[in-house]
Amino acid sequence: MVCDPSNLPRGCHDDARTSDPARRRRFHYAAPVDPTVGSFDRATALRRLADEQFDVLVIGGGATGAGVALDAASRGLATALVERTDFAAGTSSMSSKMVHGGIRYLQQFEIQLVYQSLRERHRMLQNAPHLVRVLPFVMAIYNKGGMIPRWFAWALSPVLWFYDLTGGAKIGHRHRHLGRDATIAHMPVLDPERIHSSYLYYDAQVDDARMTMAIARTAALEHGAVIANHAPVTALRKDADGRLVGATIDAGEHGHIDVRARAIVNASGVWIDSIDTLDGDPTPVIRPARGVHVVVPRALLDNDAAVIMSRPGERASVFAVPWGDHTYIGTTDTDYDGDLDRPYCTASDVDYLLGALNDSTTNDVTPADVVGTWAGLRPLLRTAGSDKTADLSRRHRVTRSASGLVSVAGGKLTTWRQMAEDTVDEVLDLLG
């Protein structure tokens, strides 16, 4: 039986793209482990980490790390995963909670990334409808000023048609142009003096932390992966030839545990440089970018769609996204050089986001109306040629060090499955 390679509940993997016949025979559609064998109990996991030999040890319990564990275990590899704090504690719970192709990436000619993202979005909607839902987006067009002034609106139509043809229409909705009144109906507080019209298109929204937990639990319970949180890696262990043979973790009350593994994957997101340093390579590859969101009662805006707005004279956009009884407004995209464990939201961040909102609406949302904030860090690849993090590519990159450490860096939440597949392909090549 050939399975959907992205099937989250089953996690089976289609390796038809692999050119090596021996690898296809060895790892062809591994049957799921008996669910009674799998465990998501930390004490049991720590015991197995100390006692067993693994084909691959994954470092990092975010969406990408959990995805690598699921992909590897479903291909028949003896798999372990360790997380420094808790699952989805970093970027994978602090995102904008969107599963999207990224229309603005088309402006950067990242066509392959958009196609890949829309393909993954479609798979997630099919495989996890309890976590991912279609969400309408209203892109406001202004009479004057703003990111999309009236005179430039005509240029958006071919972009959105391309978005639909690339994969957007697979979810059963196509974009359309809305007049001013139809636009304001989606968020009644929009300023009729500023708004000329809008484009309505569709993407998706996800409960990012729950999705990460679902991936990790599927890897453990259905495919036998050994997964432990609050188990930071303190050292990488090498043989006499300098090849990685395992890692040492701090298991708290259980002491230090030496984990034996034939391959190690660094999927630690914005912390990837710290693991590379343990491997002996201090060269930074990640440029963290801080994204801030503020949360207000939804009744203040009464929006039934994600509305994209901008401040006069600025190219950056701001989203107002419904989430239950609340609306969150975001996001910023700025360099960050502070404590990676404690990204922060400043008063100026709140003022900036509320200012963008109030510039496009008739009401006046103040900091006193804010009921919550969060700040997350994007693990962007450090590349030359751009002063702004917003202009950096959201593509991912898989590399292998001289010692055999496989690192997956960059990427975005939407493409976690593709990132996992590419990473495990590299692991299989390493294992021969």
Image (tube, grey):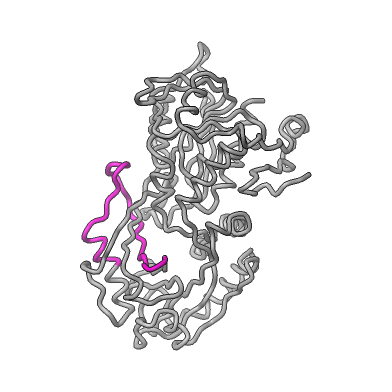
- Which quarter of the rendering shows the N terminus? top right
Q: Which residues are magenta?
A: 324-353
Q: Position of residue 181 (x, y in %)?
A: 44, 88
Out of 325 and 405, give the one closest to the viewer. 325
Residue name at image x 32 percent, y 51 percent: 335
Looking at the image, residue 282 lies above or below residue 388: above
Looking at the image, residue 158 lies above or below residue 50: below
Out of 95 and 147, give the one closest to the viewer. 95
Out of 209 and 293, give the one closest to the viewer. 209
Q: Is residue 384 visible?
A: no
Residue name at image x 55 percent, y 58 percent: 130
- Which quarter of the rendering shows the C terminus? top right
Quadrant position of residue 129:
bottom right
- Image side of residue 424 versus residue 178, left or right: right
Residue name at image x 35 percent, y 84 percent: 194
Looking at the image, residue 50 lies above or below residue 15: above
Q: Position of residue 107 (x, y in %)?
A: 50, 64
- Image side of residue 129 versus residue 268, left or right: right
Q: Is residue 78 visible?
A: yes
